[in-house]
Image: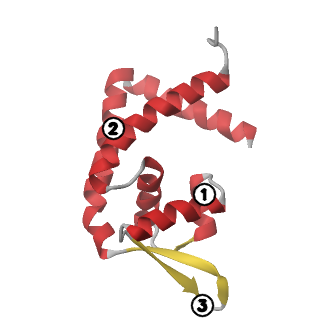
């Protein structure tokens, strides 16, 4: 019935992928959106909140809620940018740095599992096509 529906098929895919990454990030006490956000912060300490929103393609209020959760878990700290009291830079804490490798490994294991199930070239092609579709709709 919905074989040719982009919404239905991408939503079903998103739910399936959400379960995969939820299981991977569970040991760290973070949701998949928080896990990817933390990985981005660990990769670029001091990133401004609006930059983080842009990198993750999410709205600033959505980023704020995810950052609140990461801050409560002790993984990030926010620092006001000197000269601009409205802007906030995000830094990983010692606790976040301590799990960085394990967090990346957990995410990498999911990716490896998906590549194994789908085949490496099918996986790579799917990512490129999905990214292209997303970009064309922005």
Crowdedness of circle 3 by 10 Å Cα count: few (<14), some, many (20+)? few
Left or right of 75 in this view: 44: right
Q: Sort mark 2 into few (<14), some (14-19) or many (20+) by Cα contacts within 10 Å.
A: some
Residue ID at (50%, 65%): 67
| x, y percent for residue 31 | 42, 50
Residue under pointer 2: 110
In the foreground, 63 or 52: 63
Q: Is residue 51 above or below residue 10?
A: below
* Residue 76 in the image, given as x and y percentages of width and height: 41, 71
- Establish if 101 lies above or below 115: below
What residue is shown at x 45% (from left), y 55% (from top)? 34
Query: For the residues marked 3 and 2, what is the alpha-carbon distance in whole angstroms?
Result: 39 Å
Secondary structure under badge 1? helix
Distance from Cα at disc 1 to Cα at disc 3:
24 Å
Tell me: 99 left or right of 122: left
Residue 136 lies, with reference to residue 32, above or below; the image says above
Q: Which residue is mark 1?
A: 62
The alpha-carbon separation of the residues under discs 2 and 1 comes to 24 Å
Give the position of the N terminus as an image quadrant: top right
Place of residue 56 in the rendered image (x, y in percent of width and height, measured from the top left): 57, 54
Task: Find residue 19 and report its horizontal and vertical position in percent.
Answer: 40, 35
Q: Earlier in the sequence, mark 2 or mark 1?
A: 1
The residue beneath circle 3 is 82
Q: Residue at x 62, y 11 (%)?
A: 3
Name the residue located 66 percent from the left edge and 23 percent from the top edge: 6
**Tag 3 or tag 1, which sits nearer the N-term?**
1
- Choose the circle earlier in sequence order: 3 or 2: 3
Instruction: State the residue in front, 46 or 5.
Output: 5
Number of callouts:
3
């Amino acid at each position: 019935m919905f074989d040719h529906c982009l919404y239905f098929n991408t939503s079903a895919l998103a739910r399936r992928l959400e379960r995969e990454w939820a299981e991977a990030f569970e040991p760290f006490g973070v949701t998949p959106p928080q896990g990817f956000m933390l990985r981005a912060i660990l990769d670029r300490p001091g990133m401004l909140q609006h930059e983080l929103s842009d990198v993750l393609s999410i709205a600033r209020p959505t980023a704020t809620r995810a950052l609140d959760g990461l801050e409560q878990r002790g993984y990030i700290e926010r620092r006001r940018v000197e000269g601009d009291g409205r802007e906030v830079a995000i830094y990983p804490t010692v606790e976040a740095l301590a799990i960085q490798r394990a967090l990346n490994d957990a995410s990498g294991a999911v990716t490896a599992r998906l590549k194994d199930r789908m085949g490496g070239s099918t996986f790579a092609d799917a990512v490129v096509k999905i990214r292209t579709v997303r970009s064309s709709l922005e």
